[in-house]
Structures are given as C-alpha cells and as structure tokens.
Amino acid sequence: MDIAALSYGAEIGRLLTSTGGRVIAVLSNAIYLQSCEGYVVAVVGEDAVDGPLSLRIGSLPSLLDAVHNRPNPTFAIERESVHIAGIARIHLDQAHKWSPDLPGSLGDTTGRHAAVRKLIEVVAGHVHDYSLARVIATCQPSKTTANENYNVHFFQLLRDARYSTTHTSEKKSPANLAIEHLLTGMLAFETAARSREKVEAGDALMRMIGLGPGLTPSGDDVVSGILAALVWQARLGAIERAWAEQLVAQVRSASASTNYISARLLWYAGEGVLYEPAVQLGHALLAGDSGRIVEPAVQLLAIGNTSGSDLAIGMLVGCLALSVIA
C-alpha cells in the first residue's frame, strides 16, 4: 500500500534520522509511531489539524484496517518514506512541511481581557460532561467586573471552584480528584508568579504533569497551554525571557513522569509550538482580537475528549498571568 502524505510537523524530521521503531498505539483516528530514540509521530487523517507530531494522510481508514490486527507492529525509515508493519509505505516527498506562525503582537489590556471573556464563552458552550472545562465555564465575570481587575477576578473564581470541590461531602471520583489537584496547581502557579517566586512557579507546573486520564493527561495539556503562552509573551518582551526559559527547562526535566506522547508535546510547547488552531487562538488572545477567537477555539475544542479544552484553559491561565507578572 503506497500512501502520499499531505503534511507533517517538525517531529517527522527527527523521526527520519532514525532507522525505525515501533507502533505504540492504534486508535480510531490515529496511529502513533515511536522511534528507537524516543521521537513520536501521529499518523492522522486528512481532516485532522496540523501539529508538531502530526503526519496527515488521506488513506487513514485503510491503513488502520491493515495495521489493527498486526501483533507488535514496527516501522522502518527509508529515505523520504515511512514503512509501517511491512504493509504500507507513506511517501513524504510531496507533502507540505507545516511550520506554525507564532503570535507576533500584543494588544492592550482591555482588548486581551475581552478576548479572554470570548474564549470562556466558547468553552462554556462546548462542555458536554464533567471536566476541568465545566469548572472553568463557571468563571464568567459579572458585567460590573472591570477589565483591569479581571485577572484577579478569574483566579478568585478558581479559588472558589477549588473550595467547592475540596469541601464536597460526596465521594470523589478519580476524575474529580484530578480536577481538584489541577485547580490547586494553577492557583499555586498564579500565586508564585505574582510573588515573582520563579522556582516555585515552575514547581507548580511540574506537579501537574501526568495528572488525569487520557492519552495526553489533562495536566500535561494544561501545562502545555500555560508554557506556550508564556514562551510567546517572552518572545514579545512582555515577560522575562530568562524566566520563561527556566520554566521550560523545569517542565522538560519533569516530562519523564508522563507518557512518551505527552512528553514530546510538552517539549514542543517549550518552543511555543502547539496544534495549529491553538497557535491561531494564541494570536487572537495576545493581540486582544475577540473577533478572531471563535473559529480556532471551536477547532481546538474538537481535539480529543478533553485535550483541546485543557489546552485552551492552560492558555487562559498563561495569558492572564501576564496581567499579574508583567
């Protein structure tokens, strides 16, 4: 089976330096490959969004059928192609190399807070089950809340949400416990950032890594969103570049505590690279352009069960932390 790739992210370049590796997951919408060196690529369908690990192809259903029942499938690299399980060859020579255009402008405080409000509104309209997104959806400001105080108001609402989850009399499910820990982690990050306790801010991010269920745990997605938002702001001179670099180093040192897929996504978040709609959402949030929030937000929220919403929440925290520490 010969398949022409449509596009690919930066990780495929690292994968091509390997001789091959193994298939680590076969899902309904992706096949994950891991090289002997630990690089990870997600073979996804043509309707998937571009991202750092993505390798988009147009024949995913056929490839899934062919690979699904193969015991311990492997893959090999030959020039500009990936050979999977000895049954399919994905050609890269005609594919588009995806490279994100990172956010490049910073709007005023009023505009940024208006964009944040719009994003929370979109998140609130796309919550279907109990998750961190449902908790965040309650953090809508009153109409009397001044824009310049909105970051304070937002984090106070998170504190109220944590208090409610901590003091409930009901038996907590593992998912609810993870949400409680994530709220604690986000608030610890905000407190440390406001007090300019740089090491403690990084420690708060590190404690969230690996929290929650899923192919990419919620904690990893939240941290990725926070980290990328801070990297973008450092590039724009809004926060200290050295501090952002220190956070990146701390998170990368802790990524061994999560799975291989999340570890690679966290690595790219430290470069400011997320999925394409997340990057576009970052443009709108930092520029304070609320009119450009909805489309990329809807695309991002469609990723995974909670991955997209958790990334969006991390970006919210990272962008509002700007108002605290800038």
Image (cartoon, helix red, strand yellow):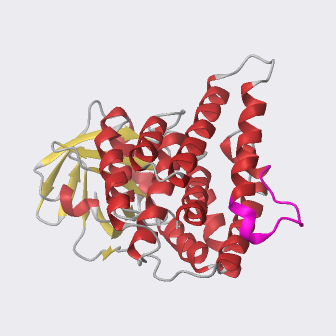
Whole-percent x and y of residue 262?
Answer: 39, 44
Determine the image quadrant of residue 292: bottom right
Q: Residue at x 41, y 46 (%)?
A: 202
Determine the image quadrant of residue 112: bottom right
Whole-percent x and y of residue 244?
Answer: 38, 60
Whether residue 91 is visible, yes or no, is yes
- Find out whether residue 118 is within the magenta segment: no
- Find out whether residue 148 is within the magenta segment: yes
Which is the main secondary structure of the residues drawn in magenta? loop
Q: Is residue 228 left or right of residue 254?
A: right
Whole-percent x and y of residue 120?
Answer: 73, 60
Q: Is residue 170 above or below residue 9?
A: above
Q: Is residue 225 left or right of residue 147?
A: left
Say which quadrant the N terminus sits in.
Answer: bottom left
Determine the image quadrant of residue 7: bottom left
Q: Is residue 195 left or right of residue 53?
A: right
Give 58 or 149, whichever is nearer the viewer: 149
Q: Is residue 32 left or right of residue 130?
A: left
Give 51 or 56, whichever is nearer the viewer: 51
Q: Residue at x 74, y 16 (%)?
A: 171
Q: Is residue 250 above or below residue 170?
A: below
Whether residue 302 is visible, yes or no, is no
Q: Total number of numbered labels?
A: 0
Query: What span is in magenta?
Result: 138-151
Q: Residue at x 81, y 18 (%)?
A: 169
Q: Residue at x 64, y 32 (%)?
A: 180
